[in-house]
């Protein structure tokens, strides 16, 4: 694969949490480059630091040491409001527990990120319904999350992550609450998005999911243990 510019770069990034009087290091001086158009998985057991790494890679949290660059901009000292605006345009998030609002129907959930980017209501509705159609849920647009299966809810979450046409899709254990067949369908959607040029980052503890990526970053005890080149990614 031809290397493009890094879309996300961690430079000696570390994260330490203060637990009372005790400092707990969760991530220790990580160096990582994720290039535009890559499909990367971040893998590690519970307690390895992968959730902290996801938060830093996704610019949801700031490091206590080192730097994080998002599309060339060092976000380590940005204000939360500026960071939220940049993050909202650049990165789409898919979570294990879906994180859909129970009082909003499918298209309203998908449209929600567009509100914070100032997209007019009619355009939000049109774009949200098109995104739902793209993940096979055109007929479920008016349904509440409680009326959808787990797989359908995750597809709504994927459509929502695409609301602002981000360059990067970050999926945290996207198949963790799904059966194997439905999980495979979700991975297939992510693979198709990658083929269309999206940068995909999947955080997982499941090697069967990780192998679909082009590259797997293994972490343990808050450090990168090794990187493995897989046979996944674009065909």
Image (tube, grey):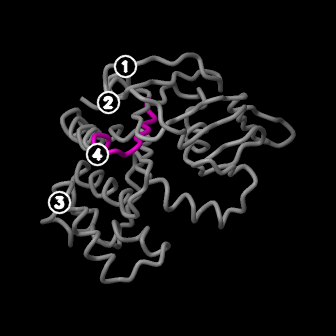
First in sequence: mark 2 or mark 3?
3
Which element is circle 2 on? loop
Instruction: Quickly name the residue at label 2.
Output: 233
Image: 70 above or below 25? below
Give the alpha-carbon distance from disc 2 to disc 3, as whole Å.
25 Å
In the picture provided, is 123 more to the left or to the right than 43? left
Residue 146 is inside the magenta segment:
no
Please report the residue visible at 28 percent of the width from the left and 40 percent of the height from the top: 195
State if disc 3 and disc 4 touch (CB < 8 Å): no
First in sequence: mark 4 or mark 1?
4
**Residue 72: where, in percent of width, then height?**
62, 47
First in sequence: mark 4 or mark 3?
3
Instruction: Quickly name the residue at label 4.
Output: 196
State if disc 2 and disc 4 touch (CB < 8 Å): no
Q: Quadrant of the N terminus?
A: top left
Residue 230 image label: 1
Which element is circle 1 on? loop
Please report the residue visible at 28 percent of the width from the left and 76 percent of the height from the top: 125
Please state which of the two labelled residues, at mark 4 or mark 3, is closer to the viewer.
4
**Residue 87: where, in percent of width, then height?**
55, 57
In the picture provided, is 25 more to the left or to the right than 114? right
Give the alpha-carbon distance from disc 1 to disc 2, as whole Å.
8 Å
Magenta residue span: 193-204
State if disc 1 and disc 4 touch (CB < 8 Å): no
Instruction: Quickly name the residue at label 3.
Output: 137
Q: Residues within 10 Å of mark 4 (few under 14, many from 20)?
A: few
Please state which of the two labelled residues, at mark 2 or mark 3, is closer to the viewer.
2
Please state which of the two labelled residues, at mark 4 or mark 1, is closer to the viewer.
4
Image: 44 above or below 54? above
In the picture provided, is 223 more to the left or to the right than 128? right
Please report the residue visible at 72 percent of the width from the left and 28 percent of the height from the top: 28
Q: Residues within 10 Å of mark 1 (few under 14, many from 20)?
A: some
């Amino acid at each position: 694969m031809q290397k493009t510019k890094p879309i996300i770069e961690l430079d000696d990034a570390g994260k330490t949490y203060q637990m009372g009087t005790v400092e707990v290091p969760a991530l220790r001086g990580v160096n990582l480059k994720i290039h535009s158009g890559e499909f990367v998985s971040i893998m590690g057991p519970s307690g390895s630091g992968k959730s902290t790494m996801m938060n830093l890679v996704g610019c949801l949290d700031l490091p206590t040491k080192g730097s994080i660059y998002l599309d060339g901009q060092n976000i380590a000292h940005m204000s939360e409001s500026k960071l939220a605006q940049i993050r909202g345009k650049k990165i789409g998030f898919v979570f294990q527990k879906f994180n859909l609002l129970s009082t909003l129907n499918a298209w309203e959930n998908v449209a929600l990120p567009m509100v914070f980017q100032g997209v007019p209501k009619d355009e939000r509705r049109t774009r949200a319904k098109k995104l739902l159609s793209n993940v096979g849920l055109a007929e479920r647009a008016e349904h509440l999350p409680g009326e959808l299966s787990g797989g359908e809810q995750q597809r709504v979450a994927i459509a929502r992550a695409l609301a602002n046409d981000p360059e990067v899709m970050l999926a945290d254990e996207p198949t963790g609450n799904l059966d194997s067949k439905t999980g495979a369908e979700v991975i297939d959607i992510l693979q198709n998005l990658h083929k269309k040029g999206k940068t995909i980052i999947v955080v997982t503890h499941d090697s069967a999911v990780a192998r679909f990526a082009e590259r797997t970053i293994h972490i343990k005890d808050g450090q990168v243990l090794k990187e493995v080149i897989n046979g996944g990614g674009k065909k």
